[in-house]
Image (cartoon, grey):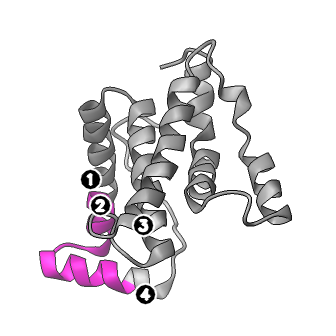
Amino acid sequence: MAKSKTATIQLKVRMKEPLRAAIARAAKARGVSLNAEVVSRLEQSWNEDAARTLDFGDSQTLGVMRALAAAKTMAEMTTGKDAYSDSQTAEIAFEANSRVLDAFFSARPGGAIDDLDPTDAQEQLLLDPMARTLGQNIGDVVLEGLSPVLEKIRKGKR
């Protein structure tokens, strides 16, 4: 029998002690129980995801924006420098983001998404690490995570 939408259920969750301690500190600072703090944070994350989706129009575009941010962050982690102040890092981030955007726009029905195969690119990198640029490699790593979004777009689902 399905639970009603207003029913309160009990859920056991496993987590590392440092996370539990951080939640307990936050709960104490707000004057609420550990359970209330966890529920509040879960509800907040759901609301934030819904708001972000509204900001970008749909979940696929939100996924692409997250992928662009991930590509920039990966470029910065690789070089140890900020993309806004270092031209080499900016170039790597730009190339990675260009690959992500190319894949996104190629994914529309009838597009050329089948030409992009991150697995082949990773094999090529193992065979000849100098054959590809850092931006291409980062772009392909991000595309691997973005593949479910691209597949939905290719099938015409929004």
At horizontal 51% and vertical 73% (from top left) the residue drawn is: 78
Front tag of 1 and 3: 3
At horizontal 49% and vertical 60% (from top left) the residue drawn is: 11
Q: Secondary structure at mark 4?
A: helix
Residue 91 position by quadrant = bottom left
Q: Which mark is residue 41?
A: 2
Q: Secondary structure at mark 2?
A: helix
Whether residue 125 sits left or right of residue 89 in the image: it is right
Residue range corresponding to the magenta coloring: 21-41
Residue 81 position by quadrant = bottom left
Q: Which mark is residue 145?
A: none
Q: CA distance from mark 4 to mark 2?
A: 17 Å
Marks 2,1: beta carbons within 8 A: yes
Does residue 43 lie above or below 6 as drawn?
below
Seen as rendered, the residue at the extreme right is 127
Front tag of 3 and 2: 3
Q: Report the residue marked by disc 1.
A: 44
Q: Report the residue marked by disc 4.
A: 18
* For marks 1 and 4 on the same chain, the one whose residue lies earlier in the sequence: 4
Q: Neighbour class for label 3 at 10 Å: few (<14), some, many (≥20)?
A: some
Does residue 35 lie above or below 118 as drawn?
below
Q: Which mark is residue 88?
A: 3
